[in-house]
Amino acid sequence: MPGYRSIRDLDWTLLIVTLALCALGVLQIYSATLSTKWQDAWWKQIVWVVSGLAMMWMASNVDYHVLLGRVTYLYLASVALLITTAVAGNKVFGSTRWIRVAGFTLQTSEFVKIVLILLVARYLTDLKTAGSVSWKDLAKLGGLVGLPMLLVMKQPDLGTSLTYIPIFVASVFMAGLRWKYVAVIATVLVVSLPIGYHFLKPYQKDRLVSFVYPDRDPKGTGFQVIQSRIAVGNGGMWGRGTKESSQTHLGFLPVPHTDFIFSSFAEEHGFVGVVIALVLYFLLIMQVVQNAQTATDKAGLYICMGVAALLLFHVLVNVGMVVGKMPITGIPLPLMSSGGSSTWSIFLLLGLVNGVRLRRFVN
Amino acid sequence: MGLLKSEHRRDERIASQRLPRDDDPKEAAGKIAIFQYLTVLVFVFLVSGFWQLQVKNPEYYSEAAERNRIKSTPLLAPRGKILDRDGRVIVDNKASYSLLLNRDEIKWEHLPAIASALQLDYSELAGVIRRSGARPQIIVKDQLTRDEIAWIESHQDTSAYPEMQLIRSWRRQYPQDGFAAHVVGYVGEIGEAELDAPQFIDYHQGDIIGKDGLERQYDKTLRGVDGQQRVLVDNLGRERQMEATQEAIPGKDLKTTLDLDLQAVGELAMAGKRGSVVAVDPRNGAVLAMVSSPSYDPNKFTGRISRKDWSQMANDPGKPLLNRAIQAQLAPGSTFKPIMAIAGLEADVVDDQTTFHCAGGASFYGHYFACHLKHGHGDIQLHRAIAQSCDVYFYNVGNRLGIDRIAHYADLAGIGRKTGIDLPNETQGTMPSTKWKLRIARQKWYAGETISVAIGQGAVTVSPMQILLELSGLGAGGKWYKPHLVKDEAPVLLRQAHFNPENLQQVVSGMYGVVNEWGTGHAAQLPNVKVAGKTGTAQVAATEKTKGAKLHSELANNAWFVAFAPVENPEIAVVALFENGVESYNAVPIVRDVLKAYFDKKARGDSRITRNAQPFQAPQLFAWVPVSGGVLR
């Protein structure tokens, strides 16, 4: 097989953009955690990135068709892993999301994303009815995605469980969905949202309320939204620089190296820095989409579009939260936020995309 | 899971076989384009979010960030002291502590506990916070007691009540027992109406402002500029480093023309009476003493949230808040006669030889007007008419002059005009004339009304300050200076009359007679100093009713006495108004006490006065025993 794959066939644009974002991330982690208890997070992040690159290389070398062929086992393993996490996981901040594997604490729900992308791709390629997905398939696939979502939601980790939705939606949309179906689903969603609100946990309700009215309780749940907006606004056009970013360095910004890394970035580098970073994310997603366009088969297309949708959702929700345009969900910013599981899972996904690219000339 | 087997077979097909025909990804191109547009939309949405925060109004957020990191503590500037003419302190400041609440931190559920610990009324405290508008810091209580300070200190650090902040403040310290209260006034929190007024444009909500007296008149001099201490803090309120400290600029001291010794004598002489004593230097208008009785304790007004004492004061029938020296409006009675005399002489309707017959009363225009001396003064000329205050003589003078000529001379002497003293809320008084009556009542003036005005009754009303200015100006040779309370102010000559010196001499000589001959004010005689003056017994109500009225009864006549000395070149002029004092001789000793104090002090060469600014201590001054002593009862 290596005969038709060359290192020149790798998606270099994607790789450069990815590494540029990782570099911004590491620098920002370094700056935001200076003289705090997390001040070694930056070199840990370097370790994650470097090991992530290796994983990306490995993932791109695995034929995704083989993975698609094993997806049933992968899926069952994922569900088992989530159940294990629930039973034997580490409880941090009141939520059981992590398990210890060989000295690493891994957030299992991050890796489930990969399996779900493969699962959806596989299910949709198997469909006999090309061009439109039937209610029955929709329900089946929904159920398959819904089960791990439910498990993650119970951890509780609403944010990560929500990231599974764009995978499902984007791929189904690509497979073809009748407009009638779209209309029905939209109606059902609109009707069920207020009902679903009642099933949220009190802190989740608070987050939603404080998203809509951040000034109602400035010291309580609205605090993070307000402080993040202040940090962003404080950055102005050119940014405050590392020394003058008071929101980041005096601790007003919550977790400035993980979920709120982009607030901290915006405070230090201003609107100009923000636009540069967002352009990089835009290029990243567009490059993934480009790989979808050149994919040789629908499975490759679904995988790439699943990854693109997932990235877009992450950026929208995380960056939107930073400017107060999205409720606080606690999902990381891909490639920039400090954290091993998130970094690894993104690199693995990008590896899959690269794998699709490497195999585009098959046929 | 029966599916597993067949799925396995399919897996192998996907992995190894060629793809079926319908597996052409190109058919999804349109949908991918939709996704790309969506992506563009998402990024535009996000960039617009940053644009709003970072480019459109970054000041709002940079200020918010500054409010986050800078903890600013106000450094309150002490107000200037108020000093007497020798630099002795009348109003001082005492260091104290105040409680400040940081608006951003206030939790409403904390307020009941804070209110009860500080003995505040909860609704008042909540009202203070609500009224404070957008001020980031609100001072809710001054003059904290030791217990309250201890409570605050033990609760602010445990972050139980992070909104509380203890700051050093200054408490205005006024003399005890309302000493000189009406002159110095008091301070209080600026009111809503004042905030809207253009002259208070530099003031902010919660500022302390002079409310009355010198405190109000010279507020801009006395108030300092508050400073600010700025400390960089982190999210837990821990202080990281000091930022620039802006020191408070203390207010300027106000050196007044008041003489504490004379003030003390006046206060003591007025104790238990209603009325006023004012002393001025006729040569320049400097006010040496100003007493209004009953008085109030301004120390009660210095707090921020004590409205109960206020309403009690405001509703007191004795009107302690009224500064009678400049706000009383009463008939001057016979103290008006010297003006009549100079008017008569200047207008040439009488001369020193003109004789009228007093038979205890006379009839004018069909009405009988009595003289205060029932059996009459007999044939009487100007000098004795002033000295013995013959009403009939002045009825005749007034009748010859007519109201408008009287008004002209009275106006020259300052009756019916504000004196322009540097105190707020002075009243104007009334000097009737034909024009005045037309304007006020739209009626013609009747000649009969002139007769009452001639002896300072009828529509004439004056304040003690006005009547003092009237006579001291005559004593000073027809020069009226604007009364003032600030020492280094240049004298302002209000009006100068070019009277015939002989005429002036006649009047002053008559007033000298009041004290030194067989006059009504003989009790004001002083050894070695020639005193001239004029008594007055002004009716409060119709004569029939007042006949049986006792001292202090509300219907009893008001007693007046105005005097100046030395008669040749007056240095001091004093007025005493003793409301309901029945007879004018009850007011005379009050004036005498002040005059004597002045000349005794002068004789000692001011040796007793320390030039250094020492805090005023009332007891020492009151050890100074005045001549007439106590209260008339």
Image (cartoon, coloured by chain):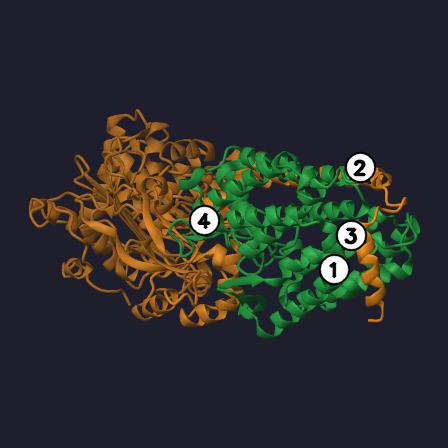
Chain colours: A green, B orange
**Residue wearing tag 1:** A71
What secondary structure is found at the residue carrying circle 4?
helix
In which quadrant of the rendered view does residue B171 lie?
A: bottom left
Q: Nearer the viewer, residue B375 or B307?
A: B307
Distance between mark 3 and mark 1 Cα atoms: 12 Å
**Labels 4 and 1: the sequence-earlier one:** 4
Q: Chain of mark 4?
A: A
Distance between mark 4 and mark 2 Cα atoms: 38 Å
Q: Which mark is residue B15?
A: 3
Distance between mark 3 and mark 2 Cα atoms: 29 Å
Labels 3 and 4 within one chain: no
The residue lying at 22 percent from left, 64 percent from top is B630
Q: Chain of mark 2?
A: B
Q: In x, y percent, where is residue A332? A: 59, 52
Q: Residues within 10 Å of mark 3 (few under 14, many from 20)?
A: some
The mark lying in front, picked from 3 and 4, is: 3
Q: Is residue B363 visible?
A: no
What secondary structure is found at the residue carrying circle 2?
helix
Q: Is residue B320 above or below residue B278?
A: below
Distance between mark 2 and mark 1 Cα atoms: 29 Å
Q: Chain of mark 1?
A: A
Q: Is residue B356 above or below residue A338?
A: above
In the rendered view, does B43 fall on the left or right side of A42?
A: right
Query: Marks 2 and 1: CB-CB under 8 Å?
Result: no
